[in-house]
Image (tube, rainbow, N blue to C red):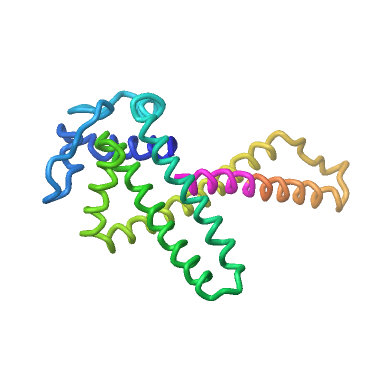
Amino acid sequence: TTLFRSVSFVTACWYFSPGDDLALGASSEGSGEIERGPGEVHGEVPGNPTRRGLALGLSSSFGTLCYAALVLSVCELLNAMARKSMRSRNLFVVVAGCCLRYIVALIEFLNKFAVSHHAVTAAPFCTSARQITAILARNALSVYVVDRIGGFVLHFGAFVLSGLVAGLTTALVASTLPATVEEEADLLAAPPRTVLLGVYMGLSFVVAFSTLNFLATQV
């Protein structure tokens, strides 16, 4: 939750940076006045949004993030109960477990956007949840599409960045390896070096993609 809140805060700073009214666009039409909090930035973007977002997440927003984490913990407990009920031979228990999993998924979805809404407006968690529920009720399909596109962009970006990291590190390693001397090399000297670099590039890509993909899923 701290990471997601920090990412949302940095994104909001980037989105509102061209204008002077930083948080005026956070309110949707017809939703009324948004309750403000101590962590909101008025009229200016902080010099280091990442550090500022982490500092707010560990200070004034810490209680809100603990509340959101508590909701996620309860959801995980209910998910475990639902998965256990799926192994039952009672049809009604299985149906109840399926319904419970869908309800938990909806709560987790709302919880994620409530944290994001809090990062932008610094409103309390319950206020953010109530306001984001009203916004989602009016723009359900648009929010779902944007959420899916955001996940695709993050995973695709992790794939591309992993390829770049693997290519650059392999090129760096290749430049440090001693070149094959033609007089001392036989026909089997070049393939092992090429295979070694290929294996290194593959391992670099796997490690980089696993790390970046994990960070993308946490966001």
Q: Nearer the viewer, residue 100 or 151?
A: 100
* 29 horizontally vs 157: left or right: left
Q: Nearer the viewer, residue 41 or 48?
A: 41
Q: Residue at x 56, y 64 (%)?
A: 85
Q: Which residues are magenta?
A: 205-219
Q: Nearer the viewer, residue 3 or 164?
A: 3
Q: How many discs mark residues in the rendered view?
A: 0
Instruction: Based on the picture, tell me whether residue 209 belongs to the magenta stretch.
Output: yes
Q: Residue at x 51, y 46 (%)?
A: 161
Q: Position of residue 171 (x, y in %)?
A: 64, 41
Q: Is residue 87 above or below residue 182?
A: below
* 64 horizontally vs 178: left or right: left
The quarter of the picture where the N terminus appears is top left
Q: Nearer the viewer, residue 49 or 103?
A: 103
**Main secondary structure found in the magenta portion:** helix
Q: Position of residue 116 (x, y in %)?
A: 33, 42
Rendered image quadrant of residue 219: top left
Q: Position of residue 175 (x, y in %)?
A: 68, 36
Q: Position of residue 180 (x, y in %)?
A: 79, 41
Q: Residue at x 15, y 32 (%)?
A: 20
Q: Residue at x 68, y 47 (%)?
A: 203
Rendered image quadrant of residue 9: top left
